[in-house]
Image (tube, rainbow, N blue to C red):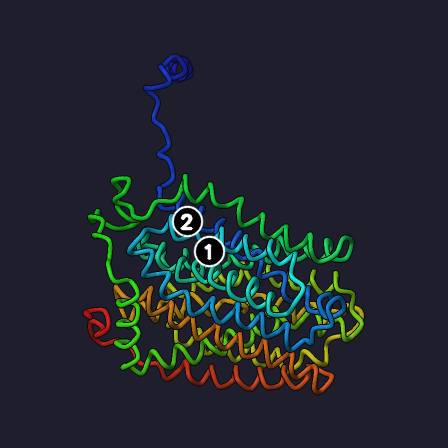
Amino acid sequence: MTETIESAARDDDRRQPREARPRRPPPPRAWLVAAVTFVTIIGGAAFNSLPGLLIDPLHREFGWSRGEIGLAVSIDMALYGLTAPFAAALMDRFGIRRVVASALTMVAAGAIAGVWMTASWQLMIYWGLLVGLGTGSMAMAFAATVTNRWFVARRGLVTGILTAAGASGQLVFLPLCAWIIDEHGWEPASVTVGLASLVVVPFVWLLMRDHPADVGLAPYGGTYVEKPAPARGAARRTVRVLFDAARTGPFWLLAGTFAICGASTNGLIRTHFVPFAHDNHMPITVAASLLAVIGVFDIIGTIFSGWLTDRFDARRLLAVYYALRGISLLFLPLLIGPDVQPPMIFFIVFYGLDWVATVPPTLALCREQYGDDSAIVFGWVLASHQVGAAVVAFLGGVARDVLGSYDVVWYAAGALCAMAALMSLVIRRASAAPEAASG
């Protein structure tokens, strides 16, 4: 009798109109915006895969020194960092969609125009100026702005995911560009990354929204707030926030540690690892594949770091990350060779996990110290990251030209990372509402 009743109930349930059945609610809109941001950062980061691959081809074709090529890369990296804080303020003034769509177009223009360059000064303009301004407008301050507006809960996790987007771009484009350069030359690779930036523009324009209130929603994990009026005087506000933050000790410690972070990642590994490996008779495609593997584990490490940042002291996390990175760099000259051996694989996996794991705790400390101005403050901290990267991108090339080897650069970077670990531990806690946030 019981089985008959249960069977009849199931039949009744199947006969119910589709509209009467409970539906699973769609994912919160904030996650769609985060997904679009993730794809955008991948498209914008496509160009970052190129410089390390093209140092040797450009040196052979045009006779430019590695120092000259490194200078163009350093201009790109410096502008990337110096543009970021102004881009965060411009997003408050003109909206995320307009700023990011314009930035993607600028990156595409610089990458594609580079195909026709014949002099090193053109390299400075196309790769340095145009690409630097474009990528800087989509830097980590972009991720910080999206996270601050669309999320209250899970901010550390979202920061980790969006930070990992740059590594995802590296994973996708490094092996592809290495293969294109090996088979067809460097020009098609430059066009490929330019087109990748253009492809993302429609997604940004159609799916991105500047603020949850634009679609009548509350941020994820928070309550509904009205969209603030456009902030006028973006440049003035950006400079004011810098002066306010610069009167505090934590800003200089965060900027100093992040400068060392940039020097030991973008400036050193991303720019000089492939030519360093080539000096040790490793094929360029193999070296590029190793960098791509770094990108795989970077995704894992950064997301995991975001999860840890939601649960543990960000200062201690930074100290551990920098100390372990410094140790690994000291051993790299002993591990490199024409073939990939297990110790080298261990280095790649370890370094990948640590690559930008520093971003979620650094952003969390900016948020703790500087409140509503944290996205702009983080933009200035990111500027120091890129200035550090620019210095090492240039000096690394000069050291190779003068000394005929990169070894001294790795040892110096390891010592700097040890200094960053100590600096992280002395960043004080914010005991009250931060002064810079109140303006």
Q: Is there a contact, CB below 8 Å, between mark 2 and mark 1? A: yes
Asked if residue 91 can be seen in this view, the reply is yes
Q: Nearer the viewer, residue 248 or 127?
A: 127
Name the kind of residue labelled 2 in the image: Ala
x and y percent of residue 345 in the render? Answer: 70, 67
* Crowd tier of the residue under label 2, counting other residues whose Cα lies within 10 Å: few below 14, some 14–19, many 20 or above: many
Question: How many marks do you count on the picture?
Answer: 2
**Is the residue 175 above or below the residue 421 in the image?**
above
**Which part of the image, by quadrant, shows the N terminus?**
top left
Q: Residue at x 37, y 68 (%)?
A: 378
Residue that label 1 marks: 161
Q: Could you tell me which secondary element the residue under label 2 belongs to?
A: helix
Distance between the Cα atoms at labels 2 and 1? 9 Å
In the image, what residue occupies the spot 75% across and 64% down? Answer: 284
Is residue 303 visible from the viewing direction of this image?
no
* Nearest the eye: 63 or 200: 63
Residue pointed to by mark 2:
34
127, above or below 195, in the image: below
Of badges 2 and 1, the one in the foreground is 2
